[in-house]
Amino acid sequence: MNSLLKRCPDVRFRRLGDESVVVKQSAGEVFVLNGIGGRVLELADGTVDIPRMVDRLEAEFDAARDVIAVDVERFARELEQAGLIESLPESGP
Amino acid sequence: MTLRDVVSRTWRDNLLFSVLIELTYRCNLDCFFCYNDLAARGKALRLDDYLRILDELAELQVLDVTLSGGEPLAHPDFFAIGAAAKERGFVIRLKSNGHALRGEVARRLRDEVDPFVVEVSLHGACASTHDRQTRVPGSFDRLLANLAELKQLGLRVKINSTLTLWNETEVERMYTIADSLGMPLKFDPAVTPRDDGDETPLNVAPTAGGVRALYTTQFERSRKLGERILDPRRSAEDADLVEVDGKHCGAGSAAVAIDPFGNVYPCVAWRVPVGNVHEQSLGAIWSSSVELDAVRAQVVGVRSALEKEGPVGNLMSFCPGLASRRTGRPDEVTPDMRERGQTLLDVMSEYSTVVTRVAGDD
């Protein structure tokens, strides 16, 4: 999953301390995400791919880069499966 | 962490999460028991004030914004405010009488405001009862047509109703209407005085038999749906209540209401001003209002008052704001509240082992 990630338009969310509360409006579903999961959602604005997310989160979280990379990959996959984010085709050079 | 944990945390840590904004007290209906203080005056908030408030709410991490009234669509800047709320990423709830929600207005609502839910009011199962309440002939037929249109547009709609002397024999038929539309119907079993203390609306308060019939209808519906039922003799937890650090509710701890003149209240039912957004930012009010601190302490006191009532205490849908308006004390239980709780307890006991939540809840 190296394409750009973008939050789905029906997703609303806010930070609540270390967690994020997420509402998927169309389905009426509520999710609670932990720190990294919430940040992945927050950063998924359609301009950032996973390697760049890992760069950003490495500076924010006190964890090894490879651990963060695994977490980000996993969360991105789960968020996509839950219909909270979508992958955009990368634009060419 | 579950949603219940989230709610608990907002109450415990005083995290502002939900704000109700009364945009205007103007309305295109004239409901007999409208609770708004229609004589209230002050410096009305303007569009730029609302944009500033919405910016601040987003910064405070408020998720839930309810646009209410009066009739919120009667505000001349409703769509600009609604669109601004959407742009800032709030979960928007709209409380409307539904009268104007048709045609272009309904389409603009969906496209420009994109509310999570639209809550409308139904006052009876026939035109004579509904229109008697709204005092606008034709409002019942128009509402039903509008509800069908909203559904067709894909908007999520919830129907609210207050049980009254006038509609208490129509409950089952009102559920039939809601079912036919595929929309949930929620009843409030209590008529309340107006915000200015006028108790005229209580003249149409439902009878004890009407309240019992409502609860019986609700439990019967739950039984038919095969829902698990609470044991009323057990704890608040089993009554699906959130209780944190002894707080009875989130009024002033996770939520506030703002009236059309900028006055801030702990909740829409608790009309004790704790600040005004013309004079202070909402953040400043939230963090430093002495009145708000007092409210947070009072909702703790309410828990102990209700515990003295036994199991009934958890079942009377006790509202400290309403109690404060009725008695001057947010922790004082009135006989009619106690009677409603006892009625619910009695009916619940008859339907043992059947419900997932207290009747009347979402």
Image: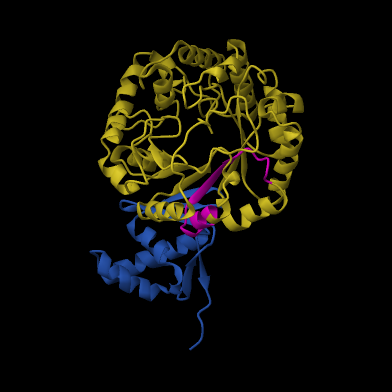
Chain colours: A blue, B yellow
Occupied quadrant, residue B147? top right
Which residue is painted at 34% across and 47% down in the image?
Answer: B282
Q: Is residue B202 magenta?
A: no
Quarter the N terminus of chain B occupies:
top left
Compared across the picture, whether B100 is left or right of B12 comes to: right
Tell me, yes or no, if residue B211 can be seen here: no
| Residue sitting farthest toward the bottom | A93
Residue B65 drawn at (x, y percent): 47, 46
The total of numbered circles placed on residues is 0
Which sits in the foreground, B261 or B298? B261
Which residue is painted at 62% across and 46% down in the image?
Answer: B156
Tell me, yes or no, if residue B56 can be seen here: yes
Residue A49 drawn at (x, y percent): 42, 74
Which residue is painted at 28% across and 71% down in the image?
Answer: A65
Which sits in the foreground, B342 or B256? B256
Q: In the rendered structure, which segment of residues is drawn in magenta?
A: B81-101
